[in-house]
Amino acid sequence: MAILEGFVLATICVGLALAARQLALASRVAVGGASSDRAPVPDFGADPTDWPTVTVLVPAHNEEQVMPGCLAAMAALEYPGDRHRILVIDDRSTDRTGAIADAFTGCDPRIAVLHRGQAARPGKSAAVAEATAITTSDVVVLFDADYLPPPGLLKELVAPFADPGVGATMGRVVPSNSDVNLLTRLLDLERRAGYGVDQTGRALWRLLPQFGGTVGGIRRAALESVGGWREGHLAEDTDLTFRLALGGWRIAFLGHACCYEEVPEDCVSRFRQVRRWAYGHNECLLSYWAAVLLSRRLRAMQKLDGALILLFYMFPACALLSTLAAILVLAYGSGPGLLPEAWPALEPLLAVAVLAPYAQIMTAAVIDRQQHVVRVLPLLFASSSLSLLASAAAVALLLRDRICGRSPGWDKTRRYRPA
């Protein structure tokens, strides 16, 4: 029973730390302004030749449904001079993705297509690594195939590279289909909290904002200095985030640089999406948790922030197991123990901790001047429960694959936009 009690108490401590972090970031954003970009953003100036060369990468696997709209938006991107190109990565597609992309090359000389055959290594990280290797631009910018960037976004994502210490930039992702059903409304709340509060607060405090793998740019020199893309990884963005941080590079979060995406409109797609994210994120936990805590480049608060970020998708599985363990201890334990003795003090703290996600969402809604979106807030438990189960499933799959020596599978997120 002592081992079970220790596991339960450790899980509770991690949960309280995660909640305290959420509340602290919500408070920081509430008193610190609407976004991290209140401070002046570096700029390359008015001379177009002073701006770095850019390659926009658009990885696409069976994306014929959204490819026309995406490429129309890419073609409308504005950038100083003739210093950017758009490379569509037709990644082993079996539909008309490649043909649609090829058709755009005849209309816009800036657009090119890399066709990866069925024998190519699967996965977004492998596709992006292959595309990066055949380009020579100073900066690489990524967009997913369902994204619709406004014309001025590319310049906004590249401007912070005027600061030589910035290794990557990250914009804000905004759902374009938030009013479709209850799930999309709940995911809109989560996105608001994640970008409007969590990422913004970390930027304001100079902690560790994350590069999200899309709506973001990477300095080629920074990418090469940390070893390039890690192929075969399901969370190549989180992996790169921590390698950049450990390598001494900063990630600039730009709350004003908004891009529009589809969020899942059904529970099955959302479950698979979170399971994929959690699987890759937990791979990063195993790779970088000790390195973050022992790093000499990171400040103490950055280490704490990084360690808690890495634990984010492991915590749900531990919470489920610790709940079962707590029931066993409290129901069948004999005599006084650590958990029964500590519970009276922990219970009020846990009651406050449960409110932390709601505090972030309400803060984001106020900052965005969209208070009406919190009308579905009482139902947040529905999407949170789905994510909890998906995260726990990801831990089980990761353990199975590590034990059996299997490679991770990849679930493509369903698209909903009319072709």
Image (cartoon, rainbow, N blue to C red):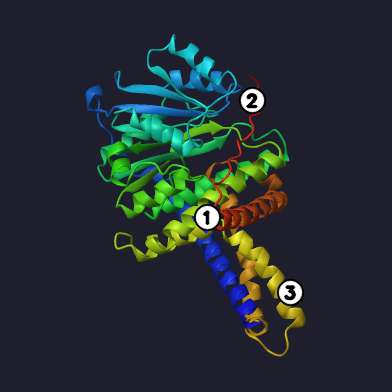
Residue 327: numbered disc:
3
Label 1 Cα crowd, 10 Å radius (few <14 / some 14-19 / many 20+): many
Tell me the residue at 48%/14% (across/down). 102
Tell me the residue at 31%/49% (across/down). 249
Identity of the amino acid at label 2? Answer: Arg
Closer to the eye: label 2 or 3: 3
Mark 3 or mark 2, which is nearer the start of the sequence? Answer: 3
Mark 3 or mark 1, which is nearer the start of the sequence? Answer: 1
- Residue 380: x, y in percent? 69, 50
Element under label 1? helix
213 vs 2, left or right, is: left
In the depicted view, which residue is nearer to us: 282 or 362? 282
In the depicted view, which residue is nearer to us: 262 or 355? 262
Say above or below: 277 vs 396. above
Residue 352: numbered disc:
none
CA distance separating discs 2 and 1? 31 Å
Label 2 Cα crowd, 10 Å radius (few <14 / some 14-19 / many 20+): few
Q: Which residue is most to the bottom?
A: 335
- Residue 99: x, y in percent? 53, 15
Which residue has dot 1 on it?
282
Tell me the residue at 58%/26% (across/down). 62
